[in-house]
Amino acid sequence: MKSRRIFTRPARIAAIAPYIWMTLFFLVPFGFVLKIALSQTVIAQPPYAPTFDLFGGWSVFRDSLSKLSLDNFYLLASDDIYIFSYLRSVTVALVSTAILLVIGYPVAYAMSRLPQRWQGIAMMLVVVPFWTSFLIRIYAWINILQHDGLLNSLLLTLHLIDRPVPWLSTDSAMYLGIVYSYFPFMILPLFATLSKMDGSLLEAAADLGCSRLKAFWLVTVPLSLPGIAAGALLCFIPIAGEFVIPDLLAGSDNMMIGQTLWLEFFTNRDWPVASTIAVVLLVLLLAPLLVYEHIQRKQLESR
């Protein structure tokens, strides 16, 4: 009995560890952000009120708690600037994810059809860009897309354009930077799913009279749906809150929510509004995760 307890203790610790991690590094910081979101902006240090004095007793804590309000949430719901920033962020994330899926699926499918010895090399080529700093890669695109950059020089040399095209500070440059940066996030889960697919299923479909294209749509695509969903979530969620790429490659006319949050926090020093933006963004990004988890649970129950 004593030996069983010794062997089961590590298993219990391993089971509890994720919850401890989520509590310390997600729930506790989120609690601080939510508290600031419910506070009011003041010219002080820190720039919000009320601040909780844990050593002042229950009456002081209760008085500070009563001063919290939802005014900042009402502000976000009534101000067109914030609403437009959220809508633009979701639109950019959806369009970018769709482009990544259209480009990434054929690449992942081709990689999964390679001989086993070449798949590792192909995967290495996809992962290699991660070895370079993200910021350096984005600045490299600035040099490529600027007025006298490499792209315009090449197009002028090939006589495809008569004068330099303003690529930089456009939505096209932003989408190009996003697709380039998040391409591996779409490839990895798709390749992991497609490489595990049983090839005999395609042979069975061919024996039943399916053409290659029909077998692809009826067999390959449905079996790769988990990889599609995982890749879409891995791309959509960080793109919706992206700040660096839109700020460096896109114009300043239409800001995404990440840029709006940075502006409120650092320029306006309005920490409560910035925290409110972050809380609402987190809730919006949790929604697709909950939907995906619900679908996965329904599929497991149906089996």
Image: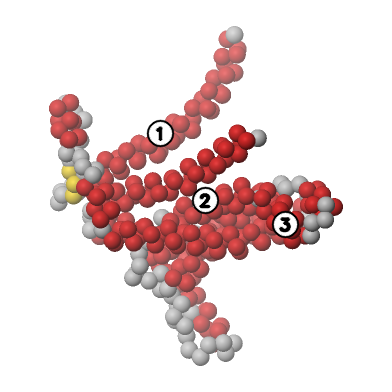
**Viewer-side label of 3, 2:** 3
Instruction: Look at mark 1 in the image and give the residue it sits on.
Output: 23
SS for callout 2: helix
Classify 10 Å Cα crowding around label 1: few (below 14), some (14-19), many (20 and above).
Answer: few
Instruction: Look at mark 3 in the image and give the residue it sits on.
Output: 216
User: For residue 9, which quarter of the picture?
Assistant: top right
Query: Going 52% across and 40% down the picture, which residue do you hit?
Result: 294
Expressed as whole percent of the image width and height from the top left, the position of residue 159 reads 57, 90
Expressed as whole percent of the image width and height from the top left, the position of residue 73 reads 26, 48
Residue lying farthest to the front in this orientation: 209
> Taking 65 as reference, is 4 left or right?
right
Nearer the observer, 282 or 117: 282
Instruction: Look at mark 2 in the image and give the residue it sits on.
Output: 233
Give the alpha-carbon distance from disc 3 to disc 2, as whole Å: 23 Å
Query: Going 51% across and 91% down the picture, which residue do you hit?
Result: 162
Nearer the observer, 50 or 144: 50
**Viewer-side label of 1, 3:** 3
**Viewer-side label of 2, 1:** 2
Expressed as whole percent of the image width and height from the top left, the position of residue 145 reads 48, 76
Give the alpha-carbon distance from disc 1 to disc 3, as whole Å: 44 Å
Q: Amino acid at mark 3?
A: Phe
Classify 10 Å Cα crowding around label 3: few (below 14), some (14-19), many (20 and above).
Answer: some
